[in-house]
Amino acid sequence: MSELVLDAPFYLPAGDEVELFRAAYEERIPVLLKGPTGCGKTRFVEYMAWQLAHELVTVSCHDDMTAADLVGRYLLAADGTTWLDGPLTQAVRTGAMCYLDEVVEARKDTTVILHSLTDYRRTLPIERLGVSLTAHRDFLLVVSYNPGYQASAKDLKPSTRQRFMAIEFDYPVAEQEATIIAHEAGVDSATAESLAFLGDRLRNLDEADLIDGPSTRLLIYVGALIRKGVPPQRACDVALVQAISDDAEIQEAVRKVASAVFPR
Amino acid sequence: MSELVLDAPFYLPAGDEVELFRAAYEERIPVLLKGPTGCGKTRFVEYMAWQLAHELVTVSCHDDMTAADLVGRYLLAADGTTWLDGPLTQAVRTGAMCYLDEVVEARKDTTVILHSLTDYRRTLPIERLGVSLTAHRDFLLVVSYNPGYQASAKDLKPSTRQRFMAIEFDYPVAEQEATIIAHEAGVDSATAESLAFLGDRLRNLDEADLIDGPSTRLLIYVGALIRKGVPPQRACDVALVQAISDDAEIQEAVRKVASAVFPR
Amino acid sequence: MSELVLDAPFYLPAGDEVELFRAAYEERIPVLLKGPTGCGKTRFVEYMAWQLAHELVTVSCHDDMTAADLVGRYLLAADGTTWLDGPLTQAVRTGAMCYLDEVVEARKDTTVILHSLTDYRRTLPIERLGVSLTAHRDFLLVVSYNPGYQASAKDLKPSTRQRFMAIEFDYPVAEQEATIIAHEAGVDSATAESLAFLGDRLRNLDEADLIDGPSTRLLIYVGALIRKGVPPQRACDVALVQAISDDAEIQEAVRKVASAVFPR
Amino acid sequence: MSELVLDAPFYLPAGDEVELFRAAYEERIPVLLKGPTGCGKTRFVEYMAWQLAHELVTVSCHDDMTAADLVGRYLLAADGTTWLDGPLTQAVRTGAMCYLDEVVEARKDTTVILHSLTDYRRTLPIERLGVSLTAHRDFLLVVSYNPGYQASAKDLKPSTRQRFMAIEFDYPVAEQEATIIAHEAGVDSATAESLAFLGDRLRNLDEADLIDGPSTRLLIYVGALIRKGVPPQRACDVALVQAISDDAEIQEAVRKVASAVFPR
Amino acid sequence: MSELVLDAPFYLPAGDEVELFRAAYEERIPVLLKGPTGCGKTRFVEYMAWQLAHELVTVSCHDDMTAADLVGRYLLAADGTTWLDGPLTQAVRTGAMCYLDEVVEARKDTTVILHSLTDYRRTLPIERLGVSLTAHRDFLLVVSYNPGYQASAKDLKPSTRQRFMAIEFDYPVAEQEATIIAHEAGVDSATAESLAFLGDRLRNLDEADLIDGPSTRLLIYVGALIRKGVPPQRACDVALVQAISDDAEIQEAVRKVASAVFPR
Amino acid sequence: MSELVLDAPFYLPAGDEVELFRAAYEERIPVLLKGPTGCGKTRFVEYMAWQLAHELVTVSCHDDMTAADLVGRYLLAADGTTWLDGPLTQAVRTGAMCYLDEVVEARKDTTVILHSLTDYRRTLPIERLGVSLTAHRDFLLVVSYNPGYQASAKDLKPSTRQRFMAIEFDYPVAEQEATIIAHEAGVDSATAESLAFLGDRLRNLDEADLIDGPSTRLLIYVGALIRKGVPPQRACDVALVQAISDDAEIQEAVRKVASAVFPR
């Protein structure tokens, strides 16, 4: 499941995140990426893996994920059982970079197995095999989470959290976001700039605490639909208004901003 | 489980949903269909699959559905274990359209596996096989949900939701619904029009926030029972009044409207 | 588990339920039977299966019932695994009538698998086999529930409910119930009439909202005990008063009515 | 697990329970025994099984009991799987009397499988085998519960409950209890009478709603300890005061009554 | 897992508990030991097993313990499955004394299987084997619990509880405890007496309802540390103050008493 | 999984903890280490294992850890099942030191199996094997927990807790911490002293009850980033401010202290 990112992912640095990540990488300091939905954390990790020419293993965490999903498990085979390394164990063995996306979503046993990997020991205990694996010298652990909508019950325990340095992410500034939208949606720069402006306006709406985003991805969808001939207001309707919320008032507020940017 | 829809499903477009879907399909933008019970979302997907001559895989999601139900699992066989692709994996491999009906009903791990499929990566991680599958270029993901009766606890996370453009559905307008009822129930157009009028009246009842629908399907049932000789009021009683609610007051309100349309 | 009902079950129609069911059967409209405890829903289904000379599969639903209990599962055998059809799959394959008693008791995944069976598709998805089964043309789905004591949390979702026409059941009228009691308990018609009168009185008690029933079955038990020589008041005590409730006040109210009917 | 009770259990009838049970038995009416802790319900069933020379299968129900515990399950064997009948299935096949002690403690799926066994069908559906078993003509179902300490959440559903006639049990009257104590504990009749008098006093204590019992069994323990030379007050202390409650006030109340009966 | 206690455990009787236990043993009356943390209940049972030269099986109960943990289970073997007796079944078969420590901690199904073992039947139903095992004539059941910190939700049901006589335990009196400490910690009698005095003072602290103990074991630890050269106040600090509580106020109260006994 | 610590871990004693541990070790008194996140408890255990030249087995406990994870389990093999000792059983057999980190996180059944290991019996019951293992004479049990953020529901039961002597840990004093930071981060002593001073200030912040730490580890991360050329304020931002909290107010308070120590 580990992959070498061969083509440069399209990524525009927003600040010193590339330098910070590189320093952390060289010191093998575990990294926590914090930021809102769809602001580019996953793509940043792929970009850094490409820059550092380092194998990458990505795991999207979820409510029902257990330690076995990360570490590995026995499978029944014709001749008894066979052990199958999980994605984390693979990364630990081969020295890949392991990225656990939305790590707090996982069950508690998964965060605890990260402990000995993220202090001076750099070991991964595999209880089912009865061994403790010392991490390859190139192994680096990267995790992400979105502080915005995590229930407090789902926070990282301090004893886990204080094993990572944390880089904060936010949506790209308007100019940069326009470049991204033009590149990904294939629209002209005027449309891209309007969409980036629209994204910025929506993220600063009075109702902004009621919604999340919009992600850059949604703005790209709007652009792509416009390119396919969908009228701009209708494109905003399906890829922004309806995509962001089911609440009539919030939808009206979003629609109003969109109409101001793309008048009929 | 994937099927090619050979006969044109009977579907009457209500607006630009066919064009929007076609644009999304060409851009491979994941689609979210929002709308009330029985308004035709499932049939619309079958219709589009037929129009685009595209294989379709449909999965009805539910509370106990896990990622394994979608992705696949190992089965014990005489010679160890055999892997069985789940419906989503089948669609990803073969480039079918995959329709997850009422996706928020499923457990959280199922929505998270959709993440890498619905961003620029278009990959499906299959942890049990230790591989990450790149989606066939024709693969398209379509999901649906009913914003009306979803508990907030069962909402899609923003990080999932902002990966889809959203097309809103509603019940057909009266004229169109009459055409559908006549076609499906085999009744004359006068009866069909009365039933469509009745449906419209019920959906705009003062008590409308207490009930859902009625779906076009129930109106078709009434029509079919009338055709079989059941008196119209009695047909309304069993296929509308009793079918919609157990609450005596709501039943009385529904019955009153039905009596006005089909006087004894 | 499917059976052909060979002997006519003893059933006295209370209204047009036989005609309604027959019309639904001919149109293959799924049927929902609503009604209180022990009013004869199960026997009605057996009666209709006999009338229509149609195979019947009955499943009593419960809290822990899962989709696999209905659809089927793999069993370990000497040579790997064997698939065993569940009762619903059997009915779908062979075109039997499938009766799911107290369907809302089952877990949510069981109601969702009914969706594609109860709309124009008439298919049963069997995920474990990777197939979608088209129902035999004679297949009919019948479900029941008791609106009286269902917790709202256990209601059918509208998207499930609006796939059925609904026939309401109630206890038989006194005269009919006397006939049933005489037939089943083997008592003379005077005793049977007294018992039917007693049942009717109890169902209209001021405390009637506190109790359920009594079912016709309990009245038959009283009759049978009287026939065996148990004094009528004592028979009422064990088969009605004690059987209906543990609450001393309710017991007293029931006993008072029973004493009026069967004075010592 | 079925047994034939060979030696007459020591049981003193308190009223017409023997005649009622015999009538129910002859009519195959399912029986529910209601009564407090340790008042002799289990022994009564053994006594009736002996009187009727009928095989008896007893199952103590509990929170974690599932339908499979009653009906049976597949076991892995060298050559695939073997089916093992559960105790209820054994009784249904062989026509034994099946006694489910404290039936409401079991999970809901266990009570639902009793439904078709307790109406005119007298069948046991065994889903895992895909068969529905018609009960042997001698099969009788007997269940018990203690209305005193059942949480309302654990009550029998009316649709289950109204399938049984109910015989109420209580502690034996003092004279009878003395006979039992003398017989079981091997003490002289004066001591036995004192203990029976003590039991009666305790069951009518002001604090009686705070405690349960004492059961006849505890009174027999006191008697046996006295016979072994333990001073009566000390015997009451360990086998009544401490055995009934941990609450200092209740203990004091019980001790006071005991001291009055057995002064130092 | 059953063992014969070969060396006399060091136990000093506090009252008539040895005589009471012997009487219960001879009458095969099940015994419940009640008392606080670390007051010697477990050692008493070992002492009695040694005195009576009776095999002993000890099981520490816990939240996740099920009936199968006590009764036994099937294990997969090369040639199908093999049954492995649990510790209770072993004791029932061989006539050992079975001690279930902190029995209320176990799940409810474990207490229910004790029912038929603790009344006149003396049988253990083993559902998985389909048999009911009659207990060896020497079998005796002993259970313990600590009434002090049991949540009411975890109380024994009366129908379980009233099957045991109950012997109450408390910490040894100061003189006796000094003898125990001297024997176990290897300290001189002056130190042992000071420690016993300290224990007694702490158990009668105003804050005594906030803490449990200290157990005799902790006092022995303090003694052992003193013997190893740790200053008495420091030994009290680590083996009493810190061991009993994390609450600063309670720690201060404990430390004050300790300082009075062992002034710096 | 047991290891012999070959290189002296870098550990600076803060008080008499080394002597206390050595005394406990010689007396085989089980040890509980109490202290905040990242204050060096784990490293202390490794240091003592090295000093005593004793094999060490470390287990990080978590919510989903069961007794089987510690004791062992059966694995399916080609020829039936094979038993695999868990880490605790390994330590008990071979006489290693077993360190259970954050023991209260584990499920209750894991703490109960420690009972017979931590009193005079020194035995480990292995129910699945049907044996009770006497601990090797060199076996020592060490556990840790953080009293700061344990929910009361997750406290150790007194009956478990009063089986350990408890050594309290805190963060190193500033001078010592500076030495550690200089050693681990490779920074000059001036920077190390500033960081130690900063750590001390943060732990005594008014908001200190809202945060945990910072751990020494985070201070080392800051040092390492500074060494790699990251400006000190920025290094504090990512490795302290963002790493400790998501709360804007707390972040501001932390940032203010950091700015005072490392002015721009």
Image: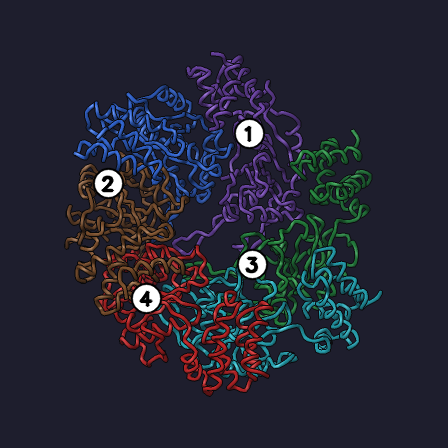
Chain colours: A red, B cyan, C green, D purple, E blue, F brown
Residue receiving disc 4: A142
Task: Measure the alpha-carbon separation of dots 1 and 2.
Answer: 46 Å
- Is the C-beta separation of discs 4 and 2 under 8 Å? no
From the top left corner, tell me how far across and down residue D236 is, in percent.
47, 20
SS category of the residue bearing label 2: loop
- Which of B69/C43 is in front? B69
From the top left corner, tell me how far across and down residue B164 is, in percent.
50, 74
SS category of the residue bearing label 1: loop
Whether labels 1 and 4 share one chain = no
- Is the C-beta separation of discs 1 and 4 under 8 Å? no
Q: Label 1 is placed on what type of residue? A: Leu
- Which of F184/B206 is in front? F184
Whether labels 1 and 2 share one chain = no
Q: How many neighbours does mark 3 have within 10 angstroms: few (below 14), some (14-19), or many (20 or more)?
A: many
Seen at 63% across and 60% down, the residue is: C98
Report the mark closest to the observer, 1 or 3. 1
- Is the C-beta separation of discs 1 and 3 under 8 Å? no
Instruction: Please identify the quarter of the rendering in which residue A229 is found.
Output: bottom right
What chain does badge 3 belong to? C
Report the mark closest to the observer, 3 or 4. 4
Q: Label 3 is placed on what type of residue? A: Lys
Residue receiving disc 3: C108
SS category of the residue bearing label 3: helix
Instruction: Please identify the quarter of the rendering in which residue E147 is found.
Output: top left
Residue receiving disc 1: D210
